[in-house]
């Protein structure tokens, strides 16, 4: 049974989402897009990254993505970046994050729900 494959379409979606995330991180300094939409999009980014390589039911990938997002946020709550000694590295602060927020958790959940709107494979019963 095959578990890995490369899907160019999902990878292309993931690359577009990555570029959007980078542009938001570099150039957007507002109170809506950066803190909220960026967190919604990151769920999609992780989902399509995994879909690019793994042959698993989309619902399992979506659930994993949501739980992974929650775990990263909980790592922020428990100051994981300091525990790992990475607080001096900008890349680590960006990837891991530095501050817990219930709003971020809500954004991850909204991103998870919106996957059902955008990814028709999640709506299929297979």
Image (cartoon, helix red, strand yellow):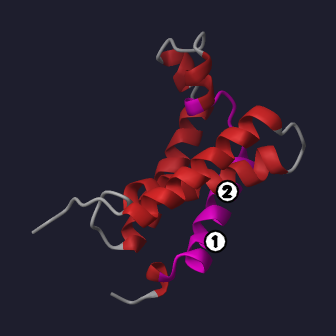
What predominant SS class does the magenta segment belong to?
helix
Towards the viewer: 21 or 76: 21
Quadrant placement of the C terminus? bottom left
Instruction: Where is residue 120? Give x, y as percent.
Output: 50, 82
Instruction: Where is residue 72? Give x, y as percent.
Output: 53, 40
When asked about the image quadrant of residue 22, the answer is: top right
Q: Which residue is mark 2?
A: 40
Question: Compared to 94, does 123 lie above or below?
Answer: below
Instruction: Where is residue 117? Give x, y as percent.
Output: 61, 79
Marked residue nearer the N-terminal end (1 or 2): 2
Rendered residue at 58%/14% (across/down): 89
Residue 71 in view here = yes
Rendered residue at 75%/42% (across/down): 24
Quadrant placement of the N terminus? bottom left
Residue placed farthest to the right in the image?
Answer: 30
Q: Which residue is mark 1?
A: 114
Q: Are marks 1 and 2 in contact (CB under 8 Å)?
A: yes
Rendered residue at 54%/34% (across/down): 75
Bounds of the magenta span?
A: 95-120
Residue placed farthest to the left in the image?
Answer: 1
């Amino acid at each position: 049974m095959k578990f890995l494959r490369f899907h160019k379409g999902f990878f292309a979606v993931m690359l577009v989402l990555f570029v959007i995330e980078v542009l938001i991180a570099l150039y957007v300094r507002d109170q809506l897009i950066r803190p909220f939409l960026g967190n919604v999009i990151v769920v999609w980014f992780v989902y399509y990254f995994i879909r690019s390589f793994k042959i698993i039911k989309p619902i399992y990938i979506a659930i994993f993505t949501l739980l992974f997002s929650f775990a990263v946020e909980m790592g922020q709550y428990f100051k994981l970046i300091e525990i790992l000694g990475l607080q001096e590295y900008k890349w680590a602060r960006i990837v891991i994050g530095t501050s817990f927020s219930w709003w971020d958790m809500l954004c991850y959940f909204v991103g998870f729900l919106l996957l059902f709107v955008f990814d028709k494979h999640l709506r299929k019963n297979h």
